[in-house]
Image (cartoon, grey):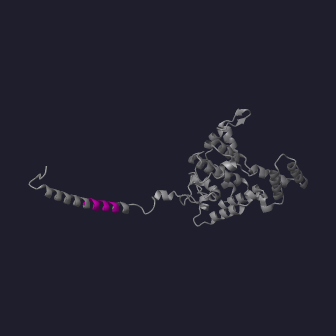
C-alpha cells in the first residue's frame, strides 16, 4: 500500500534507515571476516605440515636415524641411491627397480622364489666353488674346466662370461680369491625386499623382517659397512664378467658407496653397525616360502624342513659353500 506508515514513520524514512543498518552490518561482517582470515593465516605453518616434511624421502632415509628394524634394508642403500629413492621408501617409486625386466618378478610368488634362491644359493655357491677349483687344481685341471665350458650348451655370451671369470680367479685379479662374496647375494636380497614392498607384493613388516634375517651373518663375516660394501663392489665386478651392459656402471657404484660412507650425516657408523637388533625371525619368510609348494622326495616340504634350509645358509660358521 502506498504511504504505509509503521511506528509513526513514513515509508521513505523506513527505507533510508533500513539501508543504513544494512551498510553498517556489511562493514562489521567484512571486518570480522578479514580479522578471522588473518588469525587463521598466522596460525598456519609457513610450509607443509612437519609430519609430511619428515616423511620426504632422501637417500639416507626419512630421518637421520637408523631404526633397528630397518637395519637390513640399509644394507642395500647403494641400490637405493642408484634408483634415486630412500633405503626405507616403502611407497611405489618411479619404476620397479628392475624387478620385472631383470628378475622376472611380476607378483608375490615370483618375488618369494627369487628371494629364496638368493638366500639359499645365489651366485655365492658358484663363486666359492670356482675359487676352490682354481686354488686346489693344477694348470691342466683349469684347462679342462675351460674345455668343458666350450663344449657345453651355454650361449656364446655365457661361455665368454665363465671363461672370463676363470681367468680373473686364476690370476687373482683384484685379489678376487680373497673376497667374501656373500654380500653380493644378501645385498640383492634386501634390495628385492624393499622393491617388492614398493610394488605391493609384500608388506612393509615383511620387508623389514625378511631383510633382517641377514644381519647376524653379515656382522659375523664383515668388519663394518665399508668392509661389507667393498666386498659387494668386488663381487659385482666378478659377476659382471666384463659385460659392458653392467661393467659400465661399476665406477658409479663405487662412487655411490664412497659418498654414503663419507657423507656428513651418514648412517654407516660403527654405532649403527653394532646396534642391538630385533630377535631373528625365520618363520615369517618360511611360511611365505611354503606357499611355493617345494617338494622333497615327492612330498611337500614341511615348515621345519624349509626353515632348516634357510637357517643353514644364514648361520654358516664359515663362508665356504
Q: Residue at x 59, y 63 (%)?
A: 266
- Based on the picture, tell me whether residue 34 belongs to the magenta stretch: yes
Q: How many marks?
A: 0
Is residue 187 positioned above or below 34 on the image? above
**Left or right side of 38 for 68:** right
Work out whether residue 169 can be spotted. yes
**Left or right side of 48 for 24:** left
**Left or right side of 218 for 93:** left
Task: Pick out the residue farthest to the right.
Answer: 140
The stretch in magenta equals 28-38
Task: Pick out the residue farthest to the left.
Answer: 8
* 201 or 305, nearer to the observer: 201
* 23 or 113, nearer to the observer: 23
The secondary structure that dominates the magenta segment is helix
Horizontal and vertical percent for residue 51? 47, 57
Q: Residue at x 73, y 61 (%)?
A: 248
Which quadrant of the figure has residue 184? Answer: bottom right
Is residue 303 positioned above or below 183 on the image? above
* 144 or 195, nearer to the observer: 195
- Based on the picture, tell me whether residue 228 belongs to the magenta stretch: no
Horizontal and vertical percent for residue 57? 55, 58
Is residue 261 positioned above or below 3 on the image? below
Work out whether residue 179 can be spotted. no
Horizontal and vertical percent for residue 132? 81, 52
Task: Pick out the residue farthest to the front.
Answer: 2
Horizontal and vertical percent for residue 66? 57, 57
* 7 or 284, nearer to the observer: 7
Amino acid at each position: 500500500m502506498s504511504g504505509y506508515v509503521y511506528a509513526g514513520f513514513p515509508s521513505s524514512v523506513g527505507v533510508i534507515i533500513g539501508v543504513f543498518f544494512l551498510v553498517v552490518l556489511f562493514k562489521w561482517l567484512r571486518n570480522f571476516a578479514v580479522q578471522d582470515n588473518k588469525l587463521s593465516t598466522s596460525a598456519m605453518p609457513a610450509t607443509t605440515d612437519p609430519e609430511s616434511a619428515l616423511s620426504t624421502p632422501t637417500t639416507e632415509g626419512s630421518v637421520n636415524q637408523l631404526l633397528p628394524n630397518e637395519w637390513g634394508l640399509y644394507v642395500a642403500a647403494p641400490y637405493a641411491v642408484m634408483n634415486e629413492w630412500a633405503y626405507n621408501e616403502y611407497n611405489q617409486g618411479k619404476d620397479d627397480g628392475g624387478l620385472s625386466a631383470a628378475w622376472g618378478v611380476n607378483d608375490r610368488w615370483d618375488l618369494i622364489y627369487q628371494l629364496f634362491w638368493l638366500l639359499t644359493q645365489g651366485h655365492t655357491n658358484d663363486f666359492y666353488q670356482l675359487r676352490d677349483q682354481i686354488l686346489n687344481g693344477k694348470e691342466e685341471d683349469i684347462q679342462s674346466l675351460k674345455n668343458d665350458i666350450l663344449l657345453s650348451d651355454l650361449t656364446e655370451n655365457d661361455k665368454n662370461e665363465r671363461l672370463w671369470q676363470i681367468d680373473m680367479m686364476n690370476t687373482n685379479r683384484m685379489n678376487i680369491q680373497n673376497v667374501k662374496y656373500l654380500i653380493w647375494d644378501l645385498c640383492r636380497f634386501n634390495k628385492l625386499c624393499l622393491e617388492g614392498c614398493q610394488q605391493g607384493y609384500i608388506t612393509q613388516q615383511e620387508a623389514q623382517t625378511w631383510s633382517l634375517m641377514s644381519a647376524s651373518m653379515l656382522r659375523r663375516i664383515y668388519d663394518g659397512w665399508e668392509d661389507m660394501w667393498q666386498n659387494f663392489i668386488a663381487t659385482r665386478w666378478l659377476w659382471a664378467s666384463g659385460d659392458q651392459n653392467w661393467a659400465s656402471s661399476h665406477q658409479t657404484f663405487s662412487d655411490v658407496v664412497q659418498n654414503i660412507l663419507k657423507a656428513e650425516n651418514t648412517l654407516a657408523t660403527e654405532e649403527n653397525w653394532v646396534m642391538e637388533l630385533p630377535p631373528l625371525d625365520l618363520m615369517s619368510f618360511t611360511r611365505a616360502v611354503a606357499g611355493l609348494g617345494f617338494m622333497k622326495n615327492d612330498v611337500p616340504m614341511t615348515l621345519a624342513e624349509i626353515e632348516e634350509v634357510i637357517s643353514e645358509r644364514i648361520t654358516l660358521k664359515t663362508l665356504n659353500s
